[in-house]
């Protein structure tokens, strides 16, 4: 009997375009399809609550999909350095395969594990399953990593070709060592179950991801360039991020499908929109380049000049920001969308992040940590890189002095007012001209809309002009200190 091969699933919870799984299927012998729930190691942070919710559903979907092909997904909990050798001993497996990860602690743990398994005579093969191009492969003319997005994007666009599709196998022949029961892992929140708003919005799992891509190709992609900054348009962006974050769809699948749709002309895809969309997918890649070369990206300023930033410390302001009670409707709508659905539109992420780091002058790390816990798409690279980008401390970042105006941003991008009215229903009867600054409305308008400032909706936490000037003064102070 040929010995079994262990396929270790991590952030690649899918059967199609999964290079590790494909490689295992080419070997003789049955498979052990294994997911290990890892405790956070020292120096690592635990999975956020919203991610745990998603993981629970994604594992259910993966298990179902494997079962429909005649196999079983095995679940184990604990340190992989104990579990994997244990499973090889229990089953006689001689090979372990996985798709690579890119965080520093993860890479170190994987390298140690690989060495240990090899010492035990177990073959280990690893693959790129989660990126178009791995962080060390795309280099500038002088052999360095790219620190600026546009030239990086141009290089990827000119050189990347998606690999041939690897369809999901029709049948799976698996060996099933004893495993855990998913329900016993307690990933779904109870008491309170704050995830009620997630169910109607998301379908975690590979089928949900492929359906989402298909729907976006049919009714979102062609208007992407025009609508991607419009939080009031549901189909304005793909909402593929949580699927990508859990590896339910490979970026290569997205690239190949979009390029094919552009080339075959059947769907009348607008070329410009399609390239803008693919460039956004490549922002994710760029974030991984930054994380790979800057392992502390989620905690340390990429630009050390920001170490001297005189951040404020106000638990009260932070709490009000977290819970959508700042008195700025576009900020509050975003923070409430995040809490209710586990996701926030990109334009609004930039607005709320700018508001936290500039108007409130609170450290970007606090915002990053809140997003980490509440986003279903929380991603170690994109979250850290995007927070630093907005705060001004990141690579190729928005300049610190560009302070988003939370009033005009709302007026400009929530064009219909539907976004604020959905997430701040207490303001839904306000006319649009005061919707983003309710304190500017006269008494009669507020009364007619049933809004009582300070009671039904808060006064602004900070006056816009004051917040902006305080932020700019802090930045000037840092600049002055750097040059003296
Ligand atoms: P689409 O516009 O349809 O884009 C397609 C895909 O491209 C996305 O699914 C995503 O994988 C990628 N992408 C798009 N924009 C970006 C970007 N700016 N940076 C990196 N990748 C991008 N994205 C995450 O996936 N996880 C995070 O934890 C995360 N945290 C963020 C924090 C802040 C402060 C900001 C400003 C942005 C953050 N983003 C994060 C990036 C971006 O907001 C989301 O990827 C996007 O909103 C997801 O929605 P979508 O799938 O509809 O995107």
Image: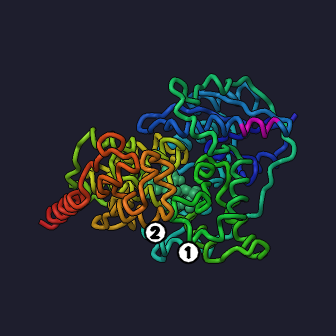
* Residue bearing the label numbered 1: 155
Q: Which residues are magenta?
A: 61-67
Sequence-wise, which precedes: disc 2 or disc 1?
A: 2
**Where is 150 relative to 16, above or below?**
below
Would residue 432 appear left or right of 125 to someone viewing this image? left
Q: Nearer the viewer, residue 134 or 264?
A: 264
Most frequent secondary structure within the magenta stretch = helix
Secondary structure at badge 2 equals: loop
Asked if residue 338 shows in the view, the reply is: yes
Location of the N terminus by quadrant is: top right
Is 233 part of what is drawn in magenta? Answer: no
Label 1 environment density (alpha carbons within 10 Å; few <14, some 14–19, many ≥20)? some
Task: Determine the residue positioned at 21% across, 63% down.
Answer: 472
Location of the C terminus by quadrant is: bottom left
- The spot of residue 154 in percent (x, y) is 54, 76
Asked if residue 293 shows in the view, the reply is: no
**Where is 173 relative to 181, above or below?**
below
* Residue bearing the label numbered 2: 146
- The spot of residue 407 in percent (x, y) is 35, 61
Q: Nearer the viewer, residue 205 or 94?
A: 205
- The spot of residue 390 in percent (x, y) is 37, 60
Quadrant of residue 349 within the rendered picture: bottom left
Would residue 212 appear left or right of 460 to someone viewing this image? right
- The spot of residue 356 in percent (x, y) is 32, 51
Task: Determine the residue positioned at 56% across, 72% down.
Answer: 226
**Colouring scheme applied when the structure was drawn:** rainbow
Would residue 299 appear left or right of 418 to someone viewing this image? left
């Amino acid at each position: 009997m040929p010995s079994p091969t262990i396929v270790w699933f991590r952030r690649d919870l899918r059967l199609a375009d999964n290079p590790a799984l494909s490689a295992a299927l080419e070997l003789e012998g049955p498979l052990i399809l294994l997911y290990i729930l890892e405790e956070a190691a020292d120096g690592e942070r635990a999975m956020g609550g919203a991610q745990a919710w998603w993981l629970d559903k994604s594992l259910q979907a993966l298990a179902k999909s494997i079962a429909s092909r005649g196999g079983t997904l095995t679940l184990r909990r604990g340190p992989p350095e104990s579990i994997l050798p244990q499973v090889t001993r229990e089953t006689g497996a001689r090979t372990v395969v996985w798709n690579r990860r890119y965080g520093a602690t993860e890479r170190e743990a994987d390298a140690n594990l690989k060495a240990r398994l090899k010492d035990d005579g177990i073959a280990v093969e690893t693959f790129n399953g989660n990126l178009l191009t791995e962080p060390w492969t795309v280099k500038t003319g002088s052999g360095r990593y790219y620190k600026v997005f546009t030239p990086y994007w141009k290089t990827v666009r000119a050189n990347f070709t998606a690999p041939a599709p690897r369809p999901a196998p029709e049948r799976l022949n698996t060996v099933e060592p004893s495993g855990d029961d998913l329900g016993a892992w307690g990933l779904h929140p109870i008491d309170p179950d704050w995830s009620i708003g997630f169910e109607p919005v998301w379908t975690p799992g590979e089928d949900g991801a492929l359906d989402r891509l298909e729907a976006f190709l049919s009714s979102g992609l062609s208007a992407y360039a025009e609508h991607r900054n419009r939080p009031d348009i549901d189909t304005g962006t793909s909402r593929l991020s949580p699927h990508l974050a859990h590896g339910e769809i490979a970026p290569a699948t997205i690239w190949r499908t979009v390029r094919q749709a552009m080339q075959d002309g059947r769907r009348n895809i607008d070329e410009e929109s399609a390239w803008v969309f693919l460039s956004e997918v490549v922002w994710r890649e760029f974030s991984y380049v930054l994380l790979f070369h800057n392992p502390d990206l989620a905690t340390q300023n990429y630009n050390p000049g920001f170490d001297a930033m005189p951040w404020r410390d106000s638990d009260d302001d932070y709490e009000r920001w977290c819970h959508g009670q700042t008195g700025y409707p576009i900020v509050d709508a975003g923070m409430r969308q995040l809490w209710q659905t586990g996701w926030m539109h990109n334009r609004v992420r930039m607005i709320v992040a700018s508001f936290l780091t500039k108007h409130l002058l609170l450290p970007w790390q606090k915002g990053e940590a809140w997003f980490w816990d509440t986003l279903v798409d929380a991603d170690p690279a994109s979250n850290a890189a995007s927070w630093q980008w907005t705060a001004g401390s990141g690579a190729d970042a928005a300049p610190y002095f560009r302070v988003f105006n939370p009033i005009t941003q709302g007026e400009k991008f929530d064009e219909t007012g539907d976004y604020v009215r959905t997430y701040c229903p207490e303001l839904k009867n306000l006319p649009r001209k005061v919707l983003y600054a309710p304190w500017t409305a006269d008494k009669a308008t507020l009364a007619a809309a049933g809004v009582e400032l300070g009671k039904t909706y808060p006064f602004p936490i900070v006056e816009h002009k004051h917040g902006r000037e305080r932020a700019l003064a802090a930045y000037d102070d840092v600049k002055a200190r750097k040059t003296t």
